[in-house]
Image: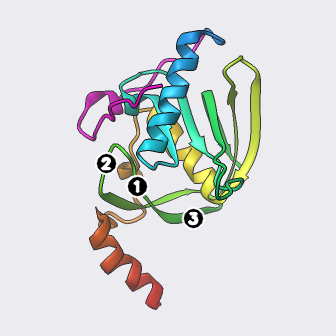
């Protein structure tokens, strides 16, 4: 497995829609997914989309925050993913991104979604999730459509360096 180079904000690959995977079970697809998983873990990420590693294909990998234990990390690869909101309820929370290192933004996302896609063998996967799990899937699927979280800010000023956000924004919220 290899650690892949992360594309950063400003690179055009992050702003274009990715193409679908047509062929499953290939060694090439498996290698991409394994390398993406290794890269995500190496960068201490919770999710990663293929364009973030300079591959314009509809592939994401993410950690399942609901099932993680101290010594066990569950990674889900999802090919050609889509999601549908389950209701209109949204929530605002802070997000970061490996392609925008050191920064955070307050982002509005659907609270509960249903997502679907395929595993490495082309078998369909469907799941209904909420909270952080739903947020991660929405964030990564956005990458596949050329959308960065900065275009979904809940407030135009709710974006900045992690340290400043923690010092000023998050502490202000906690005092209320």
Return the mark for residue 91. Answer: 3
Q: Quadrant of residue 79?
A: top right
Label 2 close to label 1 by CB (< 8 Å): yes
Residue 107 vs residue 26, the one in the foreground:
26
Task: State yes or no: residue 14 in magenta.
Answer: yes
Q: Are marks 3 and 1 in contact (CB under 8 Å)?
A: no
Q: Residue furthest front?
A: 71
x and y percentages locating residue 166 in the rendered image: 35, 74
Eyeballing the image, is 144 above or below 88?
above
Neighbor class of circle 2 (other Cα within 10 Å; few <14, some 14-19, many 20+) is some
Q: Which mark is residue 96?
A: 1
Q: Which residues are magenta?
A: 1-22
> Where residue 114 appears, x then y in whole percent?
72, 43
Residue that carries the numbered disc 2 in the rendered image: 100
Residue 150 is marked as none
Disc 3 secondary structure class: strand
Q: Determine if residue 140 is in view.
A: yes
Residue 31 x, y percent position in the rendering: 52, 19
Residue situated in front as seen by the camera: 27 or 11 = 27
Image location (x, y in percent) of residue 145: 46, 32
Using residue 56 as the reference point, say whether residue 126 is left or right of it.
Answer: right
Query: How many other residues sit within 10 Å of disc 3, few (<14), some (14-19) or many (≥20)?
Result: some
Residue drawn 23% across the image and 37% down it: 10
Q: Is residue 142 visible?
A: no
Q: Residue at x 31, y 80 (%)?
A: 168
SS of the residue under disc 1: loop
157 vs 128, nearest the viewer: 128
């Amino acid at each position: 497995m290899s650690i892949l180079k992360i594309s950063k904000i400003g690179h055009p690959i992050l702003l274009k829609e990715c193409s679908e995977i047509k062929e499953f079970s290939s060694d090439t697809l498996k290698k991409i997914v394994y390398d993406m998983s290794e890269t995500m873990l190496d960068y201490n990420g919770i999710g990663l989309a293929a364009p973030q590693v300079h591959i314009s294909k509809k592939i994401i990998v993410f950690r399942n925050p609901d099932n993680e234990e101290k010594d066990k990390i569950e990674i889900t690869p999802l090919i050609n993913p889509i999601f549908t909101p389950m209701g209109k309820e949204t929530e605002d929370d802070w997000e970061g991104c490996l392609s925008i290192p050191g920064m955070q933004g307050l982002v509005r996302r659907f609270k509960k979604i249903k997502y679907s896609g395929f595993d490495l063998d082309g078998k369909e996967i469907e799941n209904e999730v909420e909270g952080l799990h739903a947020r991660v899937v929405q964030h990564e699927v956005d990458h596949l459509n050329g959308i960065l979280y900065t275009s979904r800010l809940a407030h135009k000023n709710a974006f900045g360096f992690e340290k400043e956000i923690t010092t000023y924004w998050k502490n202000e919220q906690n005092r209320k």
